[in-house]
Image: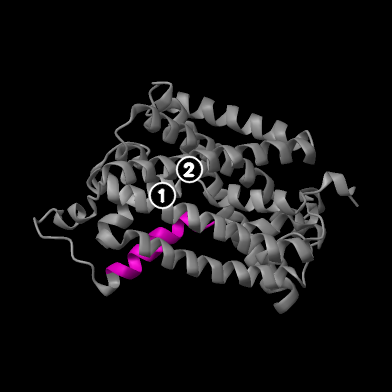
């Protein structure tokens, strides 16, 4: 049993949840959502937040009764037995590993672009990927205190960048009275037809926005490394989703008022940066995106192996994986 000071407390769990959710989604997805939903993009994110909150409450409720690591695997195994649990755990581990690989490649390519290096060169990406994995390995090997510090620091960094972006955007809106939201309704598709929001388009837009909220379902995978998970997780998950939803809706609201057309048409790596004309703010958003991507990789390096560890502890896979 790990000592209490080596485990994640309530606020560290909240920050870990935020770190595991806020990644590339809010920096990259607003453009596609605005293209599908037009001027009601902020409302779309609000709907996605409600959906995410319902799922978060479900996971939070399950964490009251099953306190071991593994999240979806542990809950399924407790409810339906080892066979179904093994299936869910294996698929969850594979899916999380693939997602982690994509996120790792994303942060490497973003860093290479900032350094003005060729991202199409396989050797550059491979070297960057290996360097990232070594850094993450060192963070995890150094123990819970180091991991907690790095995770919390990266979370505060990305939150600071996003909150400052919202504040700067609101200041610009209030001082200039700018409101270009209606311009997005004038955009056309490749056939020259106006973009019209249909029922299916609304659903697709909500799904696209929901991508920015994914990640909370993995947080309970590390419940074995948390203080009183049966009490802290049910409180931490909804609180974290609420904080994330507030920031996301604020980001999309100011972006839609300042320059929704650039949000939809920009080819920049970090689409959100194209909305703001100030170079300093652009740099801040790009830096925040890089911190955000690194932070979500830190969270993934902690949470992804816990699924396999939980199955190994239950004897469903070789013990060596524990």
Determine which of the numbered discs, if any, sits on residue 162 in the image. 2
Query: Which residue is the site of mark 1?
Result: 251
For residue 263, side relative to residue 171 (left or right): left
Q: Main secondary structure of the magenta part?
A: helix
Residue span colored magenta: 201-214
In reply to whether residue 36 is colored magenta, the answer given is no
For residue 234, side relative to residue 290 (left or right): right
Determine which of the numbered discs, if any, sits on residue 28 in the image. none
Where 216 sits versus 58, above or below? above
Residue 107: image location, x then y, percent? 49, 35
Q: Determine the image quadrant of residue 197.
A: bottom left
Q: Residue at x 51, y 29 (%)?
A: 126
Badges 1 and 2: C-beta atoms under 8 Å apart? Answer: yes
For residue 145, side relative to residue 204 (left or right): right
- Residue 57 visible in the displayed image: yes
Q: Mark 1 and mark 2: span between their CA atoms? A: 7 Å
């Amino acid at each position: 049993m790990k000592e209490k000071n080596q485990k994640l407390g309530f606020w560290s769990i909240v920050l870990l949840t935020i770190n595991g959710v806020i990644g590339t989604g809010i920096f990259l997805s607003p453009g596609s959502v605005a293209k599908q939903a037009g001027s009601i993009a902020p409302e779309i994110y609000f709907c996605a937040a409600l959906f995410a909150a319902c799922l978060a409450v479900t996971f939070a409720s399950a964490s009251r009764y099953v306190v071991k690591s593994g999240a979806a695997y542990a809950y399924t195994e407790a409810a339906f037995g080892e066979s179904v649990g093994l299936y869910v755990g294996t698929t969850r581990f594979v899916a999380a590993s693939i997602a982690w690989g994509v996120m790792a490649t994303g942060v490497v390519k973003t860093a290479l672009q900032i350094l003005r290096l060729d991202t199409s060169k396989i050797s550059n990406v491979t070297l960057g990927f290996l360097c990232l994995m070594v850094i993450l390995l060192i963070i995890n090997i150094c123990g819970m205190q180091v991991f907690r510090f790095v995770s919390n620091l990266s979370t505060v960094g990305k939150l600071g960048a996003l909150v400052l972006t919202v504040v700067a955007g609101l200041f610009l809106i209030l001082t200039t009275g700018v409101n270009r939201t209606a311009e997005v309704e004038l955009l056309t598709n490749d056939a020259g037809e106006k973009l019209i929001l249909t029922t299916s388009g609304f659903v697709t837009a909500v799904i696209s926005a929901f991508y920015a909220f994914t990640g909370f379902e993995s947080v309970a995978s590390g419940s074995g490394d948390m203080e009183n998970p049966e009490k802290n997780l049910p409180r931490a998950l909804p609180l974290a989703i609420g904080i994330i939803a507030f920031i996301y809706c604020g980001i999309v609201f100011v972006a839609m008022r300042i320059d929704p057309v650039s949000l939809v048409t920009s080819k920049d790596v970090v689409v959100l940066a194209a909305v703001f004309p100030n170079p300093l703010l652009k740099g801040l958003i790009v830096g925040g995106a890089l911190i955000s991507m690194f932070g979500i990789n830190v969270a993934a390096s902690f949470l992804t192996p816990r699924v396999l560890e939980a199955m190994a502890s239950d004897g469903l896979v070789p013990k060596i994986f524990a």
